[in-house]
Image: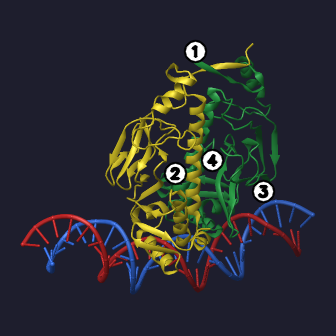
Chain colours: A green, B yellow, C red, D blue
Amino acid sequence: MPTSFAIPVGHGCSPTRAAVAQRAWVLPQNVEESVTDAPLVLSGPVLHFEQDAEIYAEGDATRAYYKVIRGVVRTCKFLDDGRRQIDAFYLPGEVFGLEAGTEHRLSAEASSECAIISNRRRGDAISGATELFARQLFSYAMRCFERAQKHAHLLCHTSAVQKVAGFLIDMEDRAPDRMINLQMTRQDIADYLGLTIETVSRTLSQLEREDVIKIPTTRRIVVTNQAKLRRLGI
Amino acid sequence: MPTSFAIPVGHGCSPTRAAVAQRAWVLPQNVEESVTDAPLVLSGPVLHFEQDAEIYAEGDATRAYYKVIRGVVRTCKFLDDGRRQIDAFYLPGEVFGLEAGTEHRLSAEASSECAIISNRRRGDAISGATELFARQLFSYAMRCFERAQKHAHLLCHTSAVQKVAGFLIDMEDRAPDRMINLQMTRQDIADYLGLTIETVSRTLSQLEREDVIKIPTTRRIVVTNQAKLRRLGI
DNA sequence: CGTCCAGTTGACTCACCTCAAACGTGGTGG
DNA sequence: CCACCACGTTTGAGGTGAGTCAACTGGACG
């Protein structure tokens, strides 16, 4: 009676060969892969998308999942009344598009010009997975959950200032150099925060007037008073 | 050179023995466990909580996870300004409290008097898991993600009517008999939808005036015009 | 120089919040 | 049995902040 059982590994690789292949999968263009921080996407071609290009649509078969290399990806839903709800922005290094079901529940689009790694998905994600991969899958799903929860918290904020400040704090925390480079339009931000484009614009101007941020260009924001920003964003 | 490799199974059980144990874990008191629908909670004591009792607090160690047997559980966050944000309601049959990290990121409280099964969590959830368990974990996490996403969608709705109608639709869909038995206060609903208690009350009254719902008692709601309700909730 | 488009600003409106009072039900005690 | 209270809920009146509509700005591009 065995105390363990076998799980097939994709392409019939031994662990050793898989590790070698993993190193080989690192792309020439400064793409670094850490199995703990950036799991799941280990191989696949690099795809390029123009701004506003569709990566996949709601209802499409979940044939692949993706990792952002450059630019920003948004996942969104289009409502019957014509409004668009943005669920999340994915920055370089972040993974998106892996789902439990066979269909994408949201659309994914390039919020800015961007490059992403595509990774083909085999079967139902889990079966045939190594323990490491299963752990990465769980960790990925939980991170998606936490991200969605944070988003819900943002949306529960009462005032526009709280929402915008909270958004800026999140973007600052996620940016590698803590320099906010908004590679998205005001409309994108509005659709993410459940506000109108005018309110987003007004609120950013207000934050600049109150010396919390500087807006050298529309897509670049410098936080000049981080403490105050965090106080505003709760 | 092997084409597969071994993964240890918790407690050294073979798959067969694990399956036997799983059947044995079914509790005496009409608690039915289906591995696909209601995964993860396979054993453990039944706990009882009075209304508003704390099940665990934000920051507590993640020693266990839970499944609701009777009543409603809410997970929430307390904000610095004294407001309370409710993240989710868990109805009978639903699982909550399993997290990726070592600390609970939210508090859990009994929204009504309730009974839950507690299941001790060992280590970091994944390691030593069977493939079945790993699949259940992933599925659980993805369901949490979808729930949080739906919540974010609700919160993005522009009007109070949309939010309340959306909430009622969700509760109706999740109730086993499609009869809405709100085992929570108006304050709970308000904190879930990011509204005030007065607005929730007014909106419910308005829906009753427009013959969309009937409110025989404050905690019981009958949908009289489902089509219109769904139209209002988008 | 003109066009185009994203973004900004202004004036006004309205929906939700705030504060306040009334209601109704369940429980307790006279 | 009724009086009273406590609490969750409902309803009312008025204020405010975000939405709406509209005009303007400024940079990119031909």
Identify the residue under disc 2: A226
Query: In which chain is the residue bearing label 3?
Result: A
Query: In which chain is the residue bearing label 4?
Result: A
Asked whether the residues under marks 4 and 1 belong to the same chain, the reply is yes
Closer mark to the observer between disc 1 and disc 2: 1
Identify the residue under disc 1: A1
Find residue C11 and report its horizontal and vertical position in percent. Answer: 60, 84
Mark 3 neighbour class, 10 Å CA radius: few under 14, some 14 to 19, many 20 or more: some
Dot 1 falls on a residue whose secondary structure is loop
Q: Answer yes or no: do the residues labelled 4 and 2 have beta carbons within 8 Å?
A: no
Give me the disc on residue A179: 4
Residue B184 versus residue D25 in the image, above or below: above
Measure how far apart labels 3 and 1 are at the Cα level: 56 Å
Q: Residue drawn at (62%, 27%), measured in percent from left and top?
A: A132
Give me the disc on residue B10: none
Identify the residue under disc 3: A52
Query: In which chain is the residue bearing label 2?
Result: A
Measure how far apart labels 4 and 1 are at the Cα level: 57 Å
